[in-house]
Amino acid sequence: MDTTAAVPPATVIPHPSTAQGATPVRHNLVSLRRLFWLRWALLGGQAALLVSCEAVAGVILPYSPLLAIFSLQALFNLLTGLRLRQHTGRGARPGDAELMGQLMVDLTALSAILFFTGGATNPFVSFYLPGLAIAAAILPWRHVVALAFYALACYSLMLIEYVPLNLHNPDNAINYHLAGMWLNFVASATMIAVFVSRLSGVLRQRDAELNLAREQLLRDARVEALNDQAAAVAHEIGTPLATLAVIAGELRADAADPRLGATRVSAYLPDLQTMEQQLELCKSILARLRDDHETAAPQRIDAWLDGYVERWQLRHPHARLEANAIGDAAGLPVEAARVGQILTILLDNAARSQLAAGHEQIPLRLAISLDDHGTPPTLTFRVTDRGLGIPPAQRARLGEAPMASMHGGQGIGVYLAQSAAQQMGGRLAWHDHHEGGTVAELRLPAPAPEPLPAAPPPASPLTTNPR
């Protein structure tokens, strides 16, 4: 069998996240950078409170443990800065676990500070909430739930165990508490407004970039699909153009022959009719480029098969094709364009092989059947020829890679047809025919019957033989 025909494989549209791989990287890097600078801001605010708390509010704080906690926070933030440099230099992204670890350290430091400054009685105890709000903005819900349980556990422990605040004037405790609540609200609102709102802006920008990427991918996919279709059309036109070239050469030779130069034009009427058929075939092939909907929409087999056989017959006017859809297979929908292109390859190769064997008078057979005993059911398109057959060694590798055939083909058509069949969830296979020749099978998952427009009632079985 010749394997020179080609069919465009299905166009696969990649997911936008793969096309914009830098987007999630940038998103997580921005989150880590925000946490880095927010931690410096909090350390500055904590240092200012530590210095002014006793003079302004009359609260005596335990300086030694608090200074140790602040120092550890500063050291950890310096390490975070180095980590940011590493991620930026390598083009890597911080994982969700790393961001969760950052927030876990912040909640732990907050818990330690609150422990030494009144525990649950400290008005800044609700500072847990901005931290959890930040976590909810940048982490998956499972990580947020884990951090929430951790914060709840710390809060609960500080209801029982903590170091009480030492006040110069305990009678002003209520006023100090109210003032602390006001400062806590200001700090919390500032954190949420600055961090979460800016992070939301990054998320909106990411969504806009993904939408633009998706639109660009769709445009590229349409162009690629059109290119593939144009390549298939160019190949299909090659057969009728070759027929026209042969007839034109014969007419030129007859016109140059002194014995035939005065032949009446009517003597060439069969040749002219063949030329008209080939030109009409070229027009119908080109029309597919202008009508994407018709070529892509599913069609019932019994409504599509007659027209397909007629069009293929025009490609090979000296060949004969008998096609039938057996039983329930006739009412099933198929992707007419893709299935038709694969079958064109198989039938073209079968016709050439049969012609090389000198059996062009024997009709090719296309049988379509439904095997509903397997899981899932299989729709089989079986092309049978009486050609030269395929050597076993070649048949075992046919369709797996481009491979030259005995008729001069390079195997690209069958290779692409196999790829297209696999993308449709099926496969091509070849077997020896018991009377000589080859049986080529296209096996596809059987689609569910759809309420498509009914076709004229076919004969039983549906048989097409235009010759």
Image (cartoon, rainbow, N blue to C red):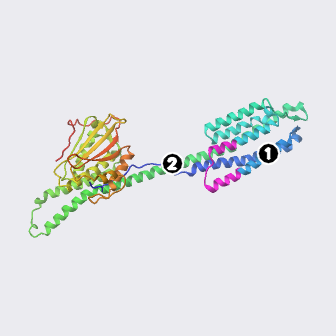
Q: Position of residue 447 (x, y in %)?
A: 35, 37
Q: Position of residue 119 (x, y in %)?
A: 80, 33
In the image, 318 versus 127, the foreground residue is 318
Residue 379 found in image quarter: top left
Residue 97 among those drawn in magenta: yes
Label 1 sits on residue: 70
Q: Position of residue 14 (x, y in %)?
A: 47, 49
Label 2 sits on residue: 16
Residue 21 among those drawn in magenta: no
Label 2, label 1: how far apart the Cα atoms are = 43 Å
Q: Dot 2 lies on which element? A: helix
Q: Mark 2 belongs to which amino acid? A: Pro
Specify the farthest residue to the front. 393
Q: Quadrant of the N terminus?
A: bottom left
Specify the farthest residue to the top. 160
Q: Is residue 82 left or right of residue 436?
A: right
Query: Going 38% across and 53% down the picture, which residue do you hit?
Result: 226
Residue 109 found in image quarter: top right
**Image mark count:** 2
